[in-house]
Amino acid sequence: MLETSARLLRLLSLLQTPREWTGAELAQRLAVSTRTVRNDVERLRTLGYPVHGTRGAVGGYRLGAGASLPPLLLDDEEAVAVAVGLRTAAGGTVAGVEETSLRALAKLEQVLPARLRRRVSALHTYTVRVPHDEPGPQVDAGILTLVSAACRDRERLRFDYARHDGTGGRRIVEPYRLVNWGRRWYLVAFDPERDDWRTFRVDRIGSPAPTGARFPPRELPEDVVDRVRRGVSSAAWRHRARITVHAPAEVVAERINPAVGTVEAVDAGTCVLHTGADRLESIAVWIGLLGVDVTVEDQPELADVLRTLGERYLRAVPPRRDGPDPS
């Protein structure tokens, strides 16, 4: 009986590989007859595993999707990767996922062999998670699954949308892609009313519902990541800034995170940084991290923040002995 059980586990492990196996291949791997393979496949089906079979000279077996989730076989590295992924997801921006992830992680750790449990426990105990400088808003998991299903089914989506300036309105769009950028989720969609592509922050989407109307596929005009990157720096934040940077564009582009802004060359030694944030202080910090001279014009609120920070930094250090008091 033990030999049969071990063979079933080995067969299940083979079938979980995303390919189709012939009966002869499985028989060779398991060192049994093809008749034994057929009997073992029936045993797996009885246990709830949806093993599909095709007849003919090129037929074979593969593991399909079932109505319920049967147990899975994971090797050591896969088990550790799943455990790390679940713990990482628990600190993400999808609302409700934290509790679900920790519940699944508890089940996984309960059945992990001692050697793997020690590895996972050590990784958790001796890892410090640093929070993001600017935490992103949480997004409901139900909204993400609903929107992604509308993308898959090419079904128009209706929702209420709150713009960054506080105004709102009802939108009906053709959804195409969800993009997870930094700490935020974005929907790239075609807006038939405006006859143009639009990028929406998912945390500002309310009461989404599929309309039932299908739409023909459109060719995306550009890479969705590039589109979201430009959208982040031009419209997605509460505060936006256009800053002249006295350095070559390629130098600035290497020092700025693409999620923070985009760089536009002016000449060989000057460029313009288009950026934004929900707090002006964040923009000020990013400017300081560039390590080059900048000019801020026609943005009095940002200028006030920079001036305040500069005065605070000067107060934090004693005056230079080889020069006049900076104050």
Image (cartoon, rainbow, N blue to C red):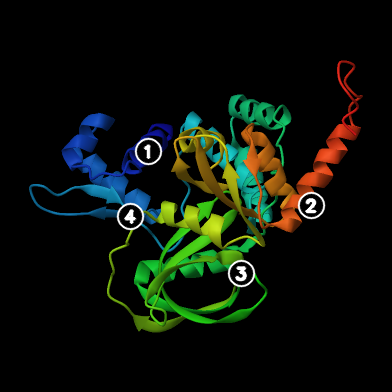
Q: Nearer the viewer, mark 4 or mark 2?
A: 2
Please name the amino acid that badge 1 sits on.
Answer: Ser
Residue type at tag 2:
Asp
Q: Residue furthest front?
A: 324
- Secondary structure type for disc 1: helix
Q: What secondary structure is marked by label 4?
A: loop
Q: CA distance from mark 1 to mark 2?
A: 63 Å
Q: Is residue 309 left or right of residue 217?
A: right
Tell me the mark number nearer the camera, choosing from 3 and 1. 3
Of marks 1 and 2, the one in the foreground: 2
Say whether disc 4 or disc 2 marks the residue closer to the N-terminus.
Answer: 4
**Which dot marks residue 64?**
4
Classify mark 1: residues with Cα within 10 Å, few (<14), some (14-19) or many (20+).
Answer: some
Query: In the rendered image, which quarter contains the N terminus?
Result: top left
- Quick one: label 3 or label 2, which is nearer the N terminus? 3
**On the rendered structure, is 156 left or right of 283?**
left
* Residue highlighted by disc 1: 13
Give the residue drawn at x 21%, y 31%: 28
Residue 172: where, in percent of width, then height? 46, 81
Foreground pick, 228 / 111: 228
**Cα gap from disc 3 to disc 2, whole angstroms:** 29 Å
The residue sitting at 70% across, 36% down in the picture is: 129
What amino acid type should be assigned to the residue bearing mark 4?
Gly
Question: Is the C-beta separation of discs 1 and 4 under 8 Å?
Answer: no
Does residue 177 appear to the left or right of 296 in the view shown? left
Find disc 2 in the rendering and name its residue.
304
Tag nearer the camera, 3 or 2? 2
